Image: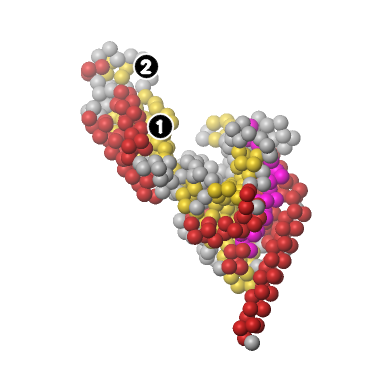
Amino acid sequence: MKKLLTILLFATAAVHAQSVKQLTSKKADAIEQQVIAWRRDFHEHPELGNHEDRTAAIIAKYLQSLGIAVKTGVAKTGVVGILKGGKPGPVVALRADMDGLPVVERTPLPFASKVKTTFNNQEAGAMHACGHDSHMAILMGVAQVLSSVKNDLKGTVKFIFQPAEEGPPFGEQGGAELMVKEGVMENPKVDVIFGLHINSQTEVGKITYRPGGTMAAVNDMQIIVKGKQAHGAYPWSSVDPIVVAAQIINNLQTVVSRNLDITQNPSVVTVGSIHAGNRSNIIPEQAEMMGTLRALSREDEKMIIARVKEVATKTAESAGAVAEVKIPFSVHYPVTYNDPALTEKMLPTLQATAGISNTVLKPAVTGAEDFSFYQEKVPGLFFFLGGMPKGQDPLKAPSHHTPDFFIDESGFTLGVKALCNLTLDYMQVK
């Protein structure tokens, strides 16, 4: 009799959980236009990293109106909301990034940004050219839906609205790294975190994911080559740092091609700038190079950093010069690593939400995301949401970080449903 009662209780709980998911799905459909309106407002009024004051005020006010406990000023302008469910259970964190980019918008949208600002002491535009406006609007929709069923929630939801994902202004701290330092994963302690990123080159209605390393670790680097200055007519009197820098650049290409097993993970070593000298007939004393390193595993990241330092310093030494290498110079994001067990556990949720054929395993990418700082603390799943109009050629769709970046808003509701369902299902099976 006791066994039968237990079975009945489990069956009743499962039926109730399913009815809650059906209710949240209907609520997500009902607020589609509100989510779009939020996104358009954020898009028209973008703010750069660590300066998202207007954005944060709108988010905080709305979360408070839902009865969600709110903390502001986290990592400068971040907003954290805590929704306690009616039943005990795990703490599920959901994250959206808030910052725009110093890009002058070129789209014909009626809500296109006309904002002018400064970035690194230079005049610049401001644009949500990566979709963070969409992420905020979607997470606000999730907050509305989940708060309406909070009595049925088996746990707590922590809504993290994070500034400066694109990196804080030079010389400042910010982003996910600072949020973690300031305790966003504690009080209450987070058990798991989910996040999404809209993609302008993935068709609306699709979700893409990858277990393990899904986005690269990034380190920027500075290499200063110190030589001996001389007249350009007498190069034998010099130790030419420009020639040495050129040799270093060439030799660095062997790090990926000869030191990395590219059948396992891709990686990148790029020198993006080189500056030296001020006259055609003077061999300067030094040359400076800046670049970026990308890797899809912690082991590869360590190896690449070590080899870049070794190649640069030894190449310079062989020419009688000195190379000073700083890695990272100002930026480091870890690998965005989707916990394999968590991904396997939650994949049926994504498939049930978008459809099996619309839930697609994706290749790893060498772009980076500071969502990785949260994943260093707890298991996390970061997935991609389609934002490209149906039937468009992905190769012709404007890419992220460009003036023509465009998102089809009809995909937002799928994002709301996916984050709601991941939360509810994780709480149910935990």
Q: Position of residue 258 (x, y in %)?
A: 32, 37
Residue type, numbered disc 1: Val
Q: Which residue is at 76% across, 48% downward?
A: 33
* Residue extending furthest toward the bottom: 1
Instruction: Examine the structure image and report whether residue 303 is included in the region drawn in magenta.
Output: no
Q: Quadrant of residue 114?
A: top right
Name the secondary structure under disc 2: loop
Name the residue carrying label 1: 271
Q: Nearer the viewer, residue 98 or 422?
A: 422
Q: Position of residue 226 (x, y in %)?
A: 29, 29
Q: Nearer the viewer, residue 237 or 305?
A: 305
Q: Position of residue 140 (x, y in %)?
A: 67, 54
Residue 172 shown left or right of residue 157 in the figure:
left
Q: Residues within 10 Å of mark 2 (few under 14, many from 20)?
A: few
Q: Nearer the viewer, residue 173 or 327?
A: 327
Q: Main secondary structure of the magenta part?
A: helix
Spatial CA distance of label 2 from label 1 is 23 Å
Q: Which residue is at 75% across, 58% downward?
A: 26
Name the secondary structure under disc 1: strand
Name the residue carrying label 2: 279
Residue 159 shown left or right of residue 218 in the figure:
right
Give the mark nearest the N terminus, 2 or 1. Answer: 1
